[in-house]
Amino acid sequence: MKHRISSSFCFWLLFILGLFYSQLDYAQTRSTVSVKGRIVDSANMEIVGAVVKIKDRPVGTTTDVDGNFTINAQVGDVLEFSYLGYRPQTIKVAASQKPLTIQLEDDSILLDNVVVIGYGTNSKEKLTGSVSTVSTSDFKNRPITDVSMALQGKVTGL
């Protein structure tokens, strides 16, 4: 005599096993910590718009006008702090995390290879168009009311 296992029995068995494994996964999650801090440069001036990111996860934030940030991370996560023209830094999140003060160091070598364009940044090697350079000395002693007037006569084809 053959024994058959009904499909509803298999469904309920898989359902119960799924609940069991989901509970094991839930029990192993790490605690979440709200990490707060401030990012400054070598002169202790706040850096506006610096990126704070959790390494290997798509979670991040930027600093406000005072250089302050807040991000929720799990204990053991690694936070990456970066900004264009500065060397990135990393810090591991602890269980009792105090407010951080991150001081980024200048990285002038990095700036030589980056071109800022109207729709983002790109390296010199990947740039496919022409580039014009305008320095601050070009704007001295000129009455400027908007950006287009500032660039008028200074950038070819504008």
Image (spheres, rainbow, N blue to C red):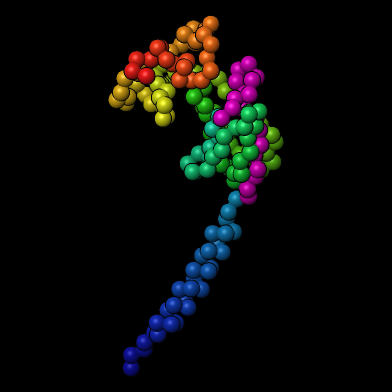
Q: Residue furthest left?
A: 128
Region rendered in magenta: 31-49
Q: Residue furthest bottom?
A: 1
Q: Quadrant of the C terminus?
A: top left
The residue depicted at 47 percent of the width and 76 percent of the height is 13
* Visible residue check, residue 14: yes
The residue depicted at 63 percent of the width and 29 percent of the height is 65
* Visible residue check, residue 78: no
Is 46 or 55 nearer to us in this picture? Answer: 46
Is 121 drawn above or below residue 107 in the view shown? Answer: below
Is 138 or 45 nearer to us in this picture? Answer: 138
- Asked whether, in this view, residue 26 is left or right of residue 113, the answer is right
**Residue 113 at what x, y percent from top left?**
39, 19
Residue 42 among magenta residues? yes
**Residue 99 at what x, y percent from top left?**
69, 34
**Residue 142 at what x, y percent from top left?**
52, 8
**Residue 42 at what x, y percent from top left?**
60, 17
Q: Place residue 44 in its image quadrant.
A: top right
Is 71 drawn above or below residue 109 in the view shown? Answer: below
The residue depicted at 54 percent of the width and 59 percent of the height is 25
- Asked whether, in this view, residue 142 is left or right of residue 33, the answer is left
Q: Quadrant of the N terminus?
A: bottom left
Is 77 or 80 nearer to us in this picture? Answer: 80
